[in-house]
Amino acid sequence: MRLERINWTQAEEYFRHNDMVIIGIGSIECHGRHIALGTDFLVPNKIIELMEPKCDVLIAPTVPYGSTDYLGDFPGTVNLGYDVLYAVVSKITQSLYKHGARKFLFMNGHGGNNAALQQVCMDLDNVNAMGCILNWWTLAWTLDPAWVGGHGGGEETAAMMAIGDDLVDRSLMADANVSDLTENLKTSSFAAINFRGFDILTRRNVRKMTDNGWIGVDHPTTATKEWGQKMLEGCAQYALDFIEEYKKVKLD
């Protein structure tokens, strides 16, 4: 059931008997030259779409924009930042809370959104409600360790192949050309440098690290449509199973 496709009386009836809402949260940002800017929006949206036929929980429209300061120098990236994303999601949850929503599942497509979403979850807890954040890409790592990936690498490329052939350009799957700080300070991710096998957290403009925009151990050329389909279907089924258990949570 899609919130945007029902009228207010149907929404009223839903909240008489149900207190859960699913909200996709995404981002519009660089994922390398080879896949679309909307990856972090399109993937959670697709997972929710796969869930929908088997799901009786109200689905709110996916928020397409996120907090992505560190990718802001790549053309096409749209950055709300922490404060605006927090304000937007807070207003959405407050509105739905007013009408009866008490449990929220955020199907998240972008790691930079987590800080704002976690604060929203704390706010919900303070009013006897609850929010849970499902980061699809780390869920995929748990479902199959072979799917572990970085940003814009094989994992996300496979997911995008499963969504649409027009979203991936194989001719642009170049090496990442990641720049290290020194011989011994290696760039291991957008948020860390590695020294003697240990990741030290930092935050830098991604364009200083790579002129391509993707990073990770999973080269995009390893991606297949079959991998993407299996991965997205696995994430959707896990989310459906989680929802059934989430429904049992008693809130005081």
Image (cartoon, grey):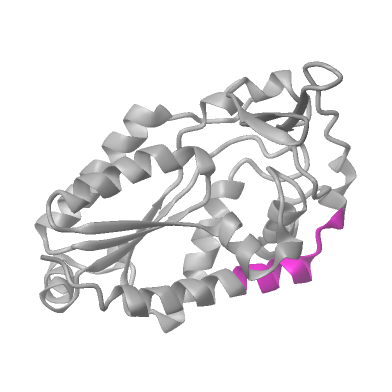
Q: Is residue 65 visible?
A: no
- Is any part of residue 9 visible from this angle? yes
Q: Residue extending furthest front? A: 196
Q: Does 182 sit above or below residue 60? A: above
Nearest to the observer: residue 216 or residue 6:
216
Q: How many marks?
A: 0
Where residue 21 appears, as percent x and y from the top left, is: 29, 64
- Judged from this view, the residue extending furthest toward the bottom is 54
Q: Residue at x 43, y 83 (%)?
A: 54
- In the rendered image, residue 123 lying in the magenta stretch gets the answer no
Q: Is residue 229 magenta?
A: yes
Residue 43 in the image: x percent, y percent?
A: 57, 57
Residue at 66% x, 25% y is: 206
Spot occupied by residue 42 in the image (x, y as percentages of width and height): 56, 54
Residue 166 in the image: above or below residue 9: above
Compared to residue 35, the image places residue 32 above or below, namely above
Q: For this rendering, which residue is in front, 17 or 149? A: 149
- Who's the residue at 77% across and 53% down the image? 154
Tell me the quarter of the image containing the C terminus.
Answer: bottom left
- The quadrant of the picture occupied by the N terminus is bottom left
**Residue 235, position as x, y percentages in the image:** 56, 69
- SS majority, magenta: helix
- Asked if residue 52 lies left or right of residue 28, the reply is left
140 left or right, relative to 123: right
Residue at 77 percent across and 71 percent down: it is 226
Q: Which residues are magenta?
A: 222-233
Q: Quadrant of residue 158?
A: bottom right
Q: Quadrant of residue 46?
A: bottom right
